[in-house]
Image (cartoon, rainbow, N blue to C red):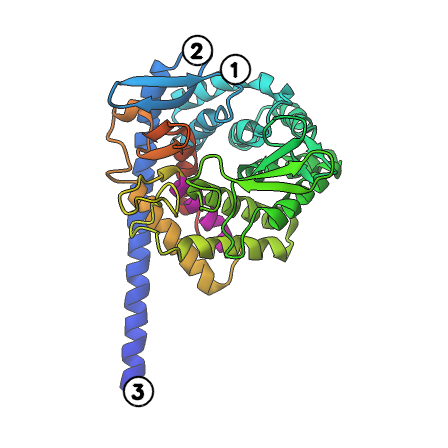
Amino acid sequence: MKNFRIALTYALILLTTLTFAQSAQNKKLFKQAFSEAAEQYKVLAQNLPADKFPKTYFPKSNKYEWSGSGWWCSGFYPGSLLYIYEQTKDQATLTEANRILKVLEKEKFNTSTHDLGFMMFCSFGNAKDIDPKPEYKEILIQSAKSLASRFDPKVGCIKSWDSNKNEYLVIIDNMMNLELLFWATKVTGDSSYYKIAVTHANTTMKNHFRPDYSSYHVINYNATTGDVQQKRTAQGFADESAWARGQAWGLYGYTVMFRETKNPIYLKQAQNIAKFIMSNPNMPADKIPYWDYNAPNIPNALRDASAASVTASALLELAKYSTPKLNKAYFKEAETILVNLSKAPYHAAQGKNGGFIIEHCVGHIPQNTEIDVPLTYADYYYLEGMKRYLAWK
C-alpha cells in the first residue's frame, strides 16, 4: 500500500509538471500569435479606405468587402487593434485604433440597431481600459441611452430588427449587447439600464431555449401584446436546428449575466448551454463546430471558426465561476479550440487572408453571403480568448 501511494504521488507530480509545461508552451504560441496579428492588421489597415471598416475578404478573387460605421461589426476592428496593442505595445496599431475610433464615434446616436454593444463596447469599452481618454465615458453613456431606447416593457426585450408593425423580432445575438447597459448603471447610478438588461435576459431565457438548452435564433413577438407568435431561424439551417454561432452568443451572454448580477440562475443557464455544446454528438474532434449542429451534410458541412472563437473566450470566463471539475473541463475545451485556431487550416499565413487572422468562417448561408471567409468577429474573440488564456492564474 505504501509503495502504491508513493507511485501515485509521483504520477500526480508528473501529470502536474506536464500540464504546466503544456500551458507554458501554449502561452508562448499565443504570444507569438499576437505578434503576428500586429503584422496582419497592418496589411488590413493599408488596404482599408479611410472611412470604412473591414467586413470580409475573398481569397479567390483577392477582393475585400468593407462596411460603413453603422454595420453591426464596426466595433470589432478597433477592438482587435486594442487587444493587439495591449499585448504587443505596437504603437502603429494604437495609432490606427485611435484613427478608426473617431470614424465610429457618431454611432453613439444610432437608435436603429440593437448592436451598439458590439459596435461601441467592443471598441470604446476596450479603449477606456487599454488607452483611456476622458471623452470615452460620455460616448459610452450616450451609446447605452441609444440602445435602451429600443426596449419595450410589454415585450420585455430590446428589439433586434425593425420589421412590420405587428412583429417585434428578437435574436439570441442580442444577449451580447447587454454588457454595455450594466456598465452604464455602474457609472451613472441609473438603475434603469441594469433593469432593462435583466428583463431582456429573463425573457430570452424563457422563450429562446429548448429543453436541451439549444436556442432558437429568432423569436417573433406580437408587438401589441408581447406574446410569442413565431420561433424560427434566419442564419441557421432550419427553425428547429442549432445554429452554431447562436449557441455561442447565448453561452457568452449568460456568462456575462452571472458576472454582472451574481444571480445563480444565469450561471446555471450558461453551464447548461456549455453542456449542450461540449457534449454535442456532431462536435468535431478539433472542437471547431460545423456552421449548424444539425447541418444536413455533416461531416462535409462547412466549419465556422467564428463560433469556435466566441465559445473559447466564453468558456475561459465561465470556468472562473464554476466548480473545480467544470473549471478544468471548460479550460481544456477552450485551450483545445484556441490551439487549433492558432494553426492551419484556421490560422492564416503571414501576409495572406487579406490581413485577417482567422480563416474558414460562415456568416449567412441562407442568404449566400460571407461563406467560408474571414470575419472580423472571429478575429476579435480569438484575440480575446488568447488574452484571457495568457492572464490565467
Residue occupied by mark 2: 50
Q: Secondary structure at mark 2?
A: loop
Position in image of residue 296 (x %, y %): 34, 44
Position in image of residue 109 (x %, y %): 64, 19
User: Is residue 26 rendered magenta in the image?
Assistant: no
Q: Amino acid at mark 1?
A: Val
First to last magenta residue range: 307-319
Q: Nearer the viewer, residue 122 or 126?
A: 122
Q: Vertical placement of 30 versus 82: above or below?
A: below
Q: Amino acid at mark 2?
A: Ala
Position of 353 with respect to 313 (left or right) is left
> Does the CB distance between marks 3 and 2 fall below 8 Å?
no
Mark 3 or mark 2, earlier in chain: 3
Q: Residues within 10 Å of mark 1 (few under 14, many from 20)?
A: some
Magenta portion: prevailing SS class: helix
Q: CA distance from mark 1 to mark 2?
A: 9 Å
Residue occupied by mark 3: 2
Q: Amino acid at mark 3?
A: Lys
Q: Nearer the viewer, residue 253 or 94?
A: 253
Q: Which residue is at 35% across, 45% downward?
A: 289
Q: Vertical placement of 372 versus 14: above or below?
A: above
Q: Secondary structure at mark 3?
A: helix
User: Is residue 315 rendered magenta in the image?
Assistant: yes
Give the quarter of the image for residue 107: top right
Mark 3 or mark 1, earlier in chain: 3
Q: CA distance from mark 3 to mark 2?
A: 72 Å
> Does the CB distance between marks 1 and 2 fall below 8 Å?
yes
Residue occupied by mark 1: 103
